[in-house]
Amino acid sequence: MRGWRVLTLLFLASLLVRLLFLWPVVAAGVQPLYDENDYLQRAVAWREILGTVAAGERPTPEVVTNAYGGGDWPPLHPMLLALGLLFPGAGVGAARLVVALISAATTPLVYALTRRLASDGAARAAALLHLAYPGFVAYSHYLWSESTYMLLLLASMLAALDSADAPTAGSRTRRALVAGICLGGAALTRAGALPVLAVLPVWLSCRLARLGLRPLAAVVVLLCSIGVLLPWLLALRAREGHWVPVSTMTGYNLALGNNPWVPPGYGSCWGIEPCKARLMTALESRAAGRGGNWKRAAAGFAREQVAAHPMTFLRRSAERLRMLWAPEFFPLRHLSQGVYPALPTPVAVLVLLAVVGGHLLFGLAAIAGLLGWKTGPPGGVALSPGLLLLLVLAGSAAPLLTVAIPRLNLPVLALLLPAAGHGLVLARHHRLPPARWLVPASLGFVLLSASALPLIARRYLMP
C-alpha cells in the first residue's frame, strides 16, 4: 500500500507542477507552432474518425487522408490527443492537458524504474528530476510526441526488467506481453524507436540465457511489438505502394543531415530554410527524373552522399552529437520569438539560467551515476546500468545519422534519469567516483554542451 501511495503522490505533485505551467500558456492563447500544429490537425481528424465510428458510420476518405497526414509520423500520439478533443468545446488547451497528464504519469514510472535499477534514494531523486527538469516540464504542454514516447519507452524497459527476473514462466510471459505492447506503442509514436525495438528483445534473450532460461519471453516481446505496429505498416504499404519503415519522412530526415548545402557546424538543414529549399529542389528534380516522389527519392540521395563523402558524414555526425547534447532551447526560442507572452527581463534571465543550469546539473549527475555504478549509498544498492546504456545508444542512433536537436535527445535524458538519480545520491553521501575519471568526463560534457550554444543563439534564438 505504501508503494502505491508514493506513486500516487508523485503523480499528483508532477501534475500540479505541469498545470502551473500549462495554465498561463492556455490563458494567453499560445498557439501550436511548426510540427505541433500538424499533430493538432491530425488529432482533429482522429476525433472525427472516433466520433463517426462510435456512431456506427464510416469516416469519409477526406478525413482518413487528413488523419494519415502523408504518413509523416506514426499515429498513436495524435490519436491520444484526439481523446482530449472529444469533449464539447474542447480545443488546443484540452490537447495540451492530455500531454500534461501523460508527462505526469511518467514521474511515478521513473520512480519505479529507478528503484528497480538502483536504490530508493536514487528513485526519489530521479522522480524529482523528472518532475522539475525544465525540458520535461516544457514538453508537458507542447503537442510534440516526446512525452508519449518517453512514457512508453520507460514502461517497456521496466516491463522487460520485470520479465527477466519473474519467478515463473507464466509471469515472465505476461510481463513480456506488457513490454511488447509498450515497445510497439513507442514505435507507433516515433520512428526513432526502431533501434530500441531491435535491442530490447536481444537484451532480454541474453539475460534469460545467462539465467539458464529459454528465450520465450524475448520472442513474445518482439512478436507483440511487431503486432502492435503491423496495422500501421500495412496502412503505409497500401497508401505508398511499398513497405515503409514506420514513417514516410525517414528518407527526408536522412537527407536533411546528408546533403551538400548543410552550413558548417550545424550537422543538418533543420530550421535553415535556404538549405532546405535547395535540398527540396534537388529531391523534386531527382524524383521527376525517376518517376517517383520526393520522399522516396530522399533516401537514395542521402545514401549516395554518405557513400561519396564518408569523412563529411563523420564530421557532421560529430556536429550532430554536440547539437544533440546542447541545452534544450525551445522554451527560450518561444520567449525570444514572442510565442510566449513577454516576461520581465529578470524572469527571462532566470528561465535561461534554469534551462542551461538544469541541463548541466542533469548531465553531471548522470555521469557521476554511470561512473559510480558499482558504488551504492550506505546500506543501499548500486546502479545496474547494462540495459540503460544499451537503450541510450539505440535511442541516439537516429539523430546522429539524420537530424540532431536537443528535443530529440529528451527520450535519452529520460533513460538516463536512473543514472542521474544515483549520481545525486552518491554526491549527497560523498561517495563520488574517483576524480581521475569524474573530472575529465564532466569537463568533456560541459564543453560539448557549451560548444553548440553560439550556433543555437545565432540561428534559432534571435528575434
Image: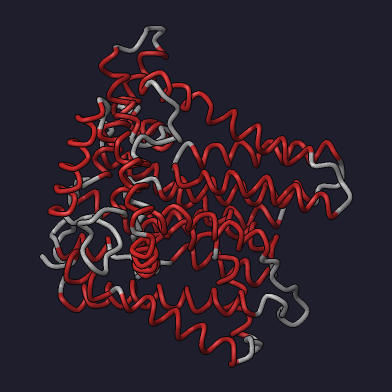
Is residue 216 or residue 363 the one in the foreground?
Answer: 216
* Residue sitting nearer the eye, 400 or 298: 298
At 21% from the left and 50% from the top, the residue drawn is 27
User: Can residue 324 be seen?
Assistant: no
Q: Is residue 96 left or right of residue 211?
A: left
Answer yes or no: is residue 225 visible: yes
426 relative to 268, above or below: below
**Whole-percent x, y for residue 194 in the image:** 52, 43
Q: Is residue 15 above or below residue 217?
A: below
Left or right of 348, for residue 382: right
Q: Position of residue 55 (x, y in %)?
A: 39, 10
Q: Residue at x 70, y 60 (%)?
A: 116
* Residue at the limit of the structure toward the bottom, as seen here: 435
Which quadrant holds residue 430? bottom right
Q: Quadrant of the C terminus?
A: bottom left
**For residue 348, above or below residue 293:** below
Q: Residue 89, located in which quarter of the rendered image?
A: top left
- Given the current orientation, which residue lies at the most extreme top position? 57
